[in-house]
Amino acid sequence: MISKKSMLNSVKVLFGGILMLAGLSMLTACGSSAPDPKVLYEDKCSSCHGLGIVESSAYSSLESWQDLVDRMQEKSNSYSDAEAKTIAEYLHQNMK
Ligand code: HEC
């Protein structure tokens, strides 16, 4: 015979589990909607010239990368300001 108290406990556990699942699925939804900066860069910056031109350039500060990405954005208009920022940050962190 299940006591009232243990019923209540299993309801609590069940409810906790549902909350956790909801939290997890929200997390994965966020993860999949945020584009991978590397993929974004390779996709957006290779349509007019090779990536070698980027890799061999001498920009180093975040501002100079941002300037470059903004200049390339004016030519192509193929990525948003938010994407430009993501690409600039990626280049700043990964190119020497
Ligand atoms: C619409 C076509 C186009 C796209 C898209 C494009 N570029 Fe360019 N890019 C050019 C052209 C044309 C030149 C050469 C003329 C110039 O320098 O303005 C160039 C030159 C460059 C140069 C060398 C000249 C300089 O100013 O340092 C770099 C570095 C560069 N691009 C990086 C990028 C990056 C990073 C991206 C992606 C965010 C990108 N490009 C996207 C057209 C494009």
Image (cartoon, grey):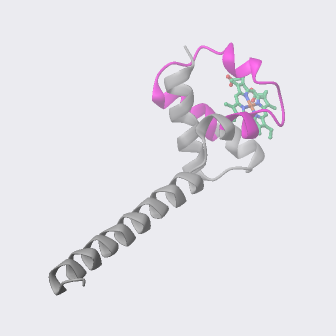
Question: Which quarter of the picture shows residue 67?
Answer: top right
Residue drawn at point x = 67 percent, y = 41 percent: 40
Quarter holding the N terminus?
Answer: bottom left
Tell which residue pokes out farthest to the left in this image: 5
Q: Give the residue drawn at x 75%, y 39%.
A: 43
Q: Quick check: 76 above or below 87?
A: below
Q: Position of residue 65 (x, y in %)?
A: 55, 29
**Residue extending farthest right:** 48
- Across and down, in percent, residue 77 comes to 73, 50
Q: Position of residue 16 (x, y in %)?
A: 30, 69
Tell me which secondary structure the magenta stretch mostly adopts: helix
Outermost residue toward the front in this view: 1
**Is 80 placed above or below 6 here?**
above
Between 68 and 10, which is closer to the camera in this rendering?
A: 10
| Residue lying at 76% horizontally and 43% vertically, measured from the top left | 75
Magenta stretch: give its range. 41-70
Magenta stretch encompasses residue 49:
yes
Quarter residue 3 falls in: bottom left
Quadrant of picture, ligand 1: top right
Between residue 65 and residue 26, name the one nearer to us.
26
40 left or right, relative to 3: right
> What is the count of numbered marks?
0
Q: What quarter of the picture does the C terminus occupy?
A: top right
Which quadrant of the view contains residue 51? top right
Q: Is residue 44 magenta?
A: yes
- Residue at point 72%, 33% (across, down): 42
Up/down of 62 relative to 36, above or below = above
Q: Position of residue 85 (x, y in %)?
A: 53, 43
